[in-house]
Image (cartoon, helix red, strand yellow):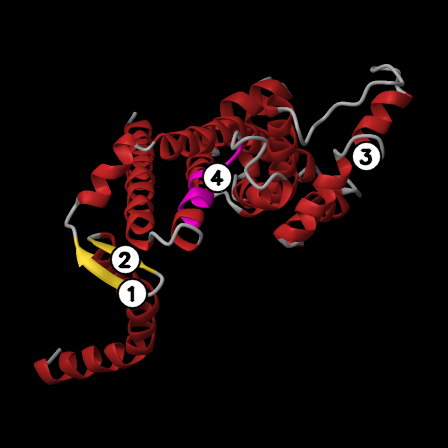
Amino acid sequence: MSKERKRKLFLTALAFMLPFLILYTAFTIWPIVEGFYVSLHKWGLMGKQRFIGFENYTKFLSDKKFWMALSNTCKFVIITVPILVIFALILALLANRGTRMKKGLRIAYFLPGVLSVSVASFVAKYTFTPYTGLVNGVLHQLHLIPADTEFQFLMEPKLVWVTICSMTVWWTIGFSMMLYISALQDIDLGLYEASAIDGANARQQLFKITLPLLKPTTYLVTLLQLIACFKVFGQIQLITNGGPAGSTKPLIQYIYETAFQKNKLGYAAAMSYVLFGILLVLSLAQMLIQKRGGDR
């Protein structure tokens, strides 16, 4: 191929890519650069005040509210991510079976995911509310709690996590389930037929064929859910607003309050980059684990 031909192909490809590159730079790359610039200054809602270097990045080390918010976020991640991954796999296995209910199950499991965060949070809030909520009503009907007792799912620090985590799992599990279903459909059915001829039962097929072949999808689902759960904000703000007494306030909500209620945009920008660093480390660790697992 001549140089002129290569040059023409390059310019053609560049012409197709240029609109995306312009938009990506304007709405992704530039805000990242600008955000880092803001984090190096004392910056309020009225604009830049003065340059302070990396002072904002050292300030959070002694900020107890920052560490409390980070602790709450980590608690949410530790509780929610394993449940999401495990239950998404279970639902995918159930919805992938060759039954008449297959399509109906997929729709039913995925349907909550089409709701907005405000609607899903409203449903959760009034499902777990005392006296009139569905959960307490069912517990009373089953005589699991006395008639004069109400679980305060929205007020007690331990029970409130039940509300937030169960709502998140119910609301977001459909996407992870569909990833698993897609991976299950890519598995060659001949593997199951050959193993059945060799005398393998359903349990052996699950642990020796299905789960090992689903490892890449499990790594992907885990990584996506880790990132999503570390960015939790909407449902907690709408259900508890970080209460009671800040026991459920996540890091994103603390960053938001610092920026727009306390008028400290520079410090908030610095904390957002700290969160970005945490997510980057977790992502790299996940990729390293996946690579080592694939080399074995």
Which is more N-terminal, label 1 or label 3? 1
What residue is shown at x 43% (from left), y 34% (from top)?
69
* Residue 133 numbered mark, or none: 3
Provide the residue designation for mark 2. 43
> What's the residue type where badge 1 is placed?
Gly
Considering the numbered disc 2 on the image, is that residue within a helix, a strand or a loop? strand
Residue 110 visible in the shown view: no
Q: How many marks can you see?
A: 4
What residue is shown at x 59% (from left), y 35% (from top)?
88
**Residue 166, located in which quarter of the rendered image?**
top right
Which range is magenta?
Answer: 248-256
* Residue 229 numbered mark, or none: 4
Which is more N-terminal, label 4 or label 2? 2
Residue 261 visible in the shown view: yes
> What's the residue type where badge 4 is placed?
Cys
Question: Measured from the top left, where is residue 203 in percent x and y?
Answer: 61, 19
Question: Measured from the top left, where is residue 169 in percent x and y?
Answer: 61, 36
Marks 2/3: CA distance?
Answer: 45 Å
* Residue 37 numbered mark, or none: none
Q: Quadrant of the C terminus?
A: top left
> What's the residue type where badge 2 is placed?
Trp
What residue is shown at x 68% (from left), y 39% (from top)?
95
Eye-nearest disc, 2 or 4: 2
Which is more N-terminal, label 3 or label 4? 3
Eye-nearest disc, 4 or 3: 3
Provide the residue designation for mark 1. 47
3 and 1 marks in contact (CB < 8 Å): no
Considering the numbered disc 3 on the image, is that residue within a helix, a strand or a loop? loop
1 and 2 marks in contact (CB < 8 Å): yes
What residue is shown at x 80% (from left), y 23% (from top)?
150
